[in-house]
Amino acid sequence: MAVAIPQEAVRGRENYLREGGLLSWLITIDHKRIGVLYGLTSLGFMGLAGIEALLMRIQLAQPDNHFLSADVYNQFFTMHGTTMIFLVIMPLGLGFFGNVAMPLQIGARDVAFPRLNALSYWIFLFGALFMYSSFLFGGGPDAGWFGYANLTERFFTPGTRVDFWAIGLIILGFSSILGSLNFFVTIVNMRAPGMTFMRMPIFVWNILVASILVLVAFPPLTVGLIFLVMDRFIGTHFYSTVAGATPILWQHLFWIFGHPEVYILALPAFGIISETIPCFSRKPLFGYAAMAYATALIGFISYGVWGHHMFASGMGPIADAAFSLSTMIIAIPTGIKVYSWVATTWGGDFVKNTSFYYALAFVIQFTIGGLTGVMHAQPAMDLQQNGSYFIVAHFHYVIGGGSLFAFLSGIYYWWPKMTGKMMDERLGKLNFWLICIGFNMTFFPMHILGLGGMPRRVYTYGAGFHWAFWNMFETVGAFVMGVGILVFVIAIIQSLMSAETAVADPWDGRTLEWSIPSPPPIYNFAEIPHVHSKDAFWEMKHGRAQESRQPAAQPEHGAGGHGIHMPAPSLFPILLAAGLALVGIGAIAWLRITFVGVLIVYLAIIGMGFEYGTYGEHPSKERGDDAFPLDSRKVGMWTFIGSESLFFASLIGTYMVYKGRDLVGPTAKEILEIPLTSFSTFVLLMSSLLMVLALAAFERGNIRAGRNWLFGTAGLGCVFLGGQAYEFTKFFREGVTLQHNLFGQTFYTLVGFHGLHVLLGVIWLLTLAFASFKGMVPKKRALAVEFGGLYWHFVDIVWIVIFSLIYLMDKVTGA
Amino acid sequence: MAKFLFESGQGAFALTLLFFFVFSIAFAFVIYWKGFAAPKPSTTDHPKLVRTEAIWIFVALTLFLVVNMSSIPYMPTVISNALAANSSRNHIQDVNILAVSWAFDISNRNLQVGQPIRFSGTSFDTLHGFAVYQPDGRLLFTMMLIPGMPRPTSLIHVFEKAGTYTVRCLEYCGTGHANMQDRLIVVNNTSKSSPMAGSIEK
C-alpha cells in the first residue's frame, strides 16, 4: 500500500492564498486565485439575484399586491434571470470549478494561457458591473433575460436599460469565449503524461464539452446582440417590422445559443456530481466510458433542439415533430448519466457528509426537472404549459435544484483543497436541509400553479383564480431557502476563521488534485505525475496487489521541484478588460470614451504580446515538461478561428434569410459589381501569398525580407479595404444605406465586419513589422508571425465564401 | 388515454409523476438498502447493472418514440390541418385577433360549442401571445402573435364545453403584460348540431 506519493517530494508549503498582498490579486495569473475570484464574484451576484427573487416573492405572496410596481418587478425578473445564468451559474461552473479543480485534475501547473485566464475574469467582472450599473442610470434592464425582439427596439423601450443589457452581454460573451478557449486548449494539450482522453477524470470531460459548447454557442448570440445594438443605436431594422424583417430572427439566433447554454450550465454540474458520488460511495464511477460518450453526445444534440422553445410560434407540424424528437433523444444521454449515478451508489459504502447529501438531492431534483423537460418536448403537451408557472418550476428544478445543488456539493468537496480548512459538518447539514426544504417548498407548488393557469412574468394576479395559497406557501419556502444560504455563508466564514488544517487527502479521493498539499503550492505539482490508469491517485493508493509494485501514477524523477518557473504576474489583463468596459461605457455615454477604450485595448494587447519578449520563451516552454504534443498557442489560434467562423456563419445566415425580402430596391442583383470586387478578391488572395513568403523569411531568420513581405501583405490588405471603401461610398450615393432596406443592412453588416477583420489583420501585421525593427521578432519567435498569418489566411478564406455566396451566386443565377 | 395525455393539460404532469414514482422508489431502494443499511463495498461495475442499463436505454428510447409518434395527431397544428382538410371552407368560422399593447382586438368574442373556429392573429406592435384558458383555469391552447410576419399565426379549434374562456397574453410585452386579458364566451349550439362536433374525437 505504502507507495511514494508526490506530496512527499514537495519541499516548502507555499500557500497560494497568502503570497503577496491584496494588490497582488489584481495582477495575479494563478489559476487557483482566479478561480477564487470567480467564486467570490459569483457568490456576490448570487446574493443580489437572491434578494431580487425574495422581493419578487414578497410581491407575489398575495393577490393584487402593490409591494413592487410592474416596472420594478419587470426589472427584477429580468435581472434575476440574467444574473443567475450569466453571472452566477455559468461563471461558477466554468470559471470557478473549471479553474479551481480542472488544472489540478489533469496534473498541470496552470492553464494553457494564464494571462488570458485573468483577462476573462476581469472582463467578466467589469461586464457584470457594467450591466448592473444600469440601475444607477434610470433603472435596470426590463426586457426579460431572453430579450425577445421587438420589445427590445428603441421605439418600445427607450432609455438606456436595454443598452446596458445588450452591451453588457456582448462584453460577458468575450469573457466566456476567451475562458472556454483557454480551458479547451488546456485539456487538449496539457494533460499529464499518460493521461489519455479515456483516463481523464469525468469532471474534465464535462468541462471540455461545456467549453466547446461555449465556443460554438456564443458567436450566434453575439451576432444577435450586435444586430440589436445596431437597431438601437443606428436605426437598422433587423428586428423591427418596418423594412420587412421579422422579430422571429432574434428567437432563432437566441435559442441556437440558448439551448446549448442550458447544457453549458448543466455539464459542469454533471461533472461535479460524477466526482462526488463515486468519492463518497467509495466506488469507481459506474460506466465511465458511457458517461464520457453521453457527455459528448449531449454536446452534439444540444444544437438540434432549439426549436422546442418556439412551438407556439407556428413553425409547422414537420418542424415541430422534428424538434420534438430531437429533444426527446437528448434525454437519453442525460438519462444514461442519471442511471450511472444511481448504479454508482449501488453497493456503496457511504460517507454521509454534506457534499454527498447535496449530490443525492441533485440526482432527485434534477430528475424531476429532466422529466418535466421530456414532457415539454411534445408540442401537444407543451402548448398547454408554455408560458405558465409549470415552465418556471421545470427550469428551476434543472438549474436551481440541479446545477446549484451540484455546485454546493462541489464547494463542500473541494473546499479543503482550496483553502486548507474543513467546513463544519453540523452547519453544513443545517444549511443542506434548509436549502433543500426551502427549494422544494418554493418550486414544487409551481407545477400545480402552472397547471392551474398561472402565467409567468406577471407582477400580480387577481384574487379570483385561487392561486393565493400556493403563492404564499412558495414565499415562505423562498425565505427558508434564503436562511439556508445565509447559514451557508456563515459556514464559509466560520471555516475561514478556523485554524483547523485540512490534510492533503481528506476524502480518500480518486483524482490527482488530492495528491498535492491543501492548499496547493503555487506551482501545484512539484513533479508532474505520470498517469497509467483512470482514477490515477486511487490506483496509486489502493491499487491491486499485482500492480502495487508498479505504482499507477508515479512522479517524474529528476525535476525535484527545482527550476519550476511560473509565469510572472501581469498588469495587462485588468488593463485590457478596463479598456473593453470603457468601449461599452462610451457607446452609451459619450462616443469619445470608446476611442480611448479601443486605444487602451490595443496597447494592452501589444503589451501582452511582447511582455515575455524580454526574457525569451513563452512560459509554456519553461515548465520543464515540454512533452506537449502541440504548441498551445497554435491550438488556441485554431480554436479561435473555429469560433470566429461561426460568427461569420451567423452573419451569412442572416443575409441568406433576409435575401429577397426587401420592400424597396436596389438589391444585390442590381447593384453589386463583379469586375471591381473580383479585382479586390484577387488582391486579397495575393496578400496571402506574400504572407506565406513573410513567414518563410522569418523562419529562415531573414528579418529584413520578412518585414518587407509583411509590409507588402498589409499594403495589399489596404488596397482591398480601399476598394471596399470605394464600393460602400458608391452604394451610399445610390441610396443604399444601412437603414434603407434589408439588403443594405445585412450586406453592410456582413461585409463591414469582414472589412473590420481585415483592418485588424492589417494592424496586427504592421505591429509585427514595426516590432521587428526593434528586434522583438527574432527567428525563434517566428511563431508570432505564424499566428498573424493564420488569422490573415482565415480572413481571406471567409472573403472567398462571402464573394461566392453574395456576389457571384446572385449574378450567376440571375443571368 | 391518449386524449388525457395530450389534451387534458394534466398529461405532462401525470407522466412526470409516473416516471418519477418508479425512479424515486428505485433510488430510495439503492440508497437505503444498498448504502446506508447494509453497505457492501465493491469496486467493480456489476455486469448485471450494465445489462440493466442497456435494457433501460432501449426501453426508454422505445417509450419516447411511442409517446412522440402518438402525440403527433394531437399537435395543435396537425389538428388544425386535419380540420381544415375535412371541412369545406364555409364551415369554419374565422376569428381575427389583433394584439396591441396591452389589449386584444378580437373580431368575435361570442362563439359556439362544436363549431370549428379559425383563430388568426397578428400583432400591431410587439410580440404578444394569445392563450385561451378553460373555464376551470387550465390552459387550452396558445399562439404567438408576431408582428411583421407575411401570414398571421393561425389555429383551428373546436370548443367542447360552454363557458367563459379567459384570454391572456403569454409573451412578455412590458409593464402592461400582467393585465393584458380578455375573454371569450362560448355557448351551446342551439340551432343544429354541427357536423364537425365529433371529428376531433377520433
Image (cartoon, coloured by chain):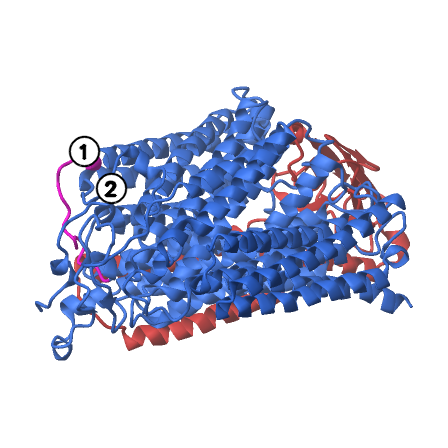
Chain colours: A blue, B red
Q: Earlier in the sequence, mark 2 or mark 1?
A: 2
Tell me which segment is drawn in magenta.
Answer: A495-510
| A490 is higher (above) or lower (below) than A436 | above
Chain for numbered disc 2: A
Location of mark 2 (residue): A17
| Neighbours of disc 2 within 10 Å: few (<14), some (14-19), many (20+) | some
* Residue at the (39%, 32%) spot, across then down: A47
* Residue at the (52%, 61%) spot, across then down: A785
Location of mark 1 (residue): A497
In the image, are marks 2 and 1 on the same chain? yes
User: At numbered mark 1, what does the secondary structure look like: helix, strand or loop?
Assistant: helix
Numbered tag placed on residue A281 in the rendering: none
Q: Label 2, label 1: how many angstroms apart (C-alpha)?
A: 14 Å
| A285 is higher (above) or lower (below) than B100 | below
Asked if residue A405 can be seen in this view, the reply is yes
Side of A672 where A504 appears, left or right: left
* A497 magenta-colored: yes
Name the amino acid type tagged 2: Leu
Side of A617 where A64 appears, left or right: right
| Neighbours of disc 1 within 10 Å: few (<14), some (14-19), many (20+) | few
Name the amino acid type tagged 1: Met
User: Taken as a whole, is the magenta stretch helix, strand or loop?
Assistant: loop
| A287 is higher (above) or lower (below) than A25 | below
Which image quarter is the C terminus of chain B in?
bottom right
Which image quarter is the N terminus of chain B in?
bottom right
Rendered location of residue A648, percent (x, y): 65, 57
Question: Which label sits in the foreground, 2 or 1?
Answer: 2
Side of A510 where A181 appears, left or right: right
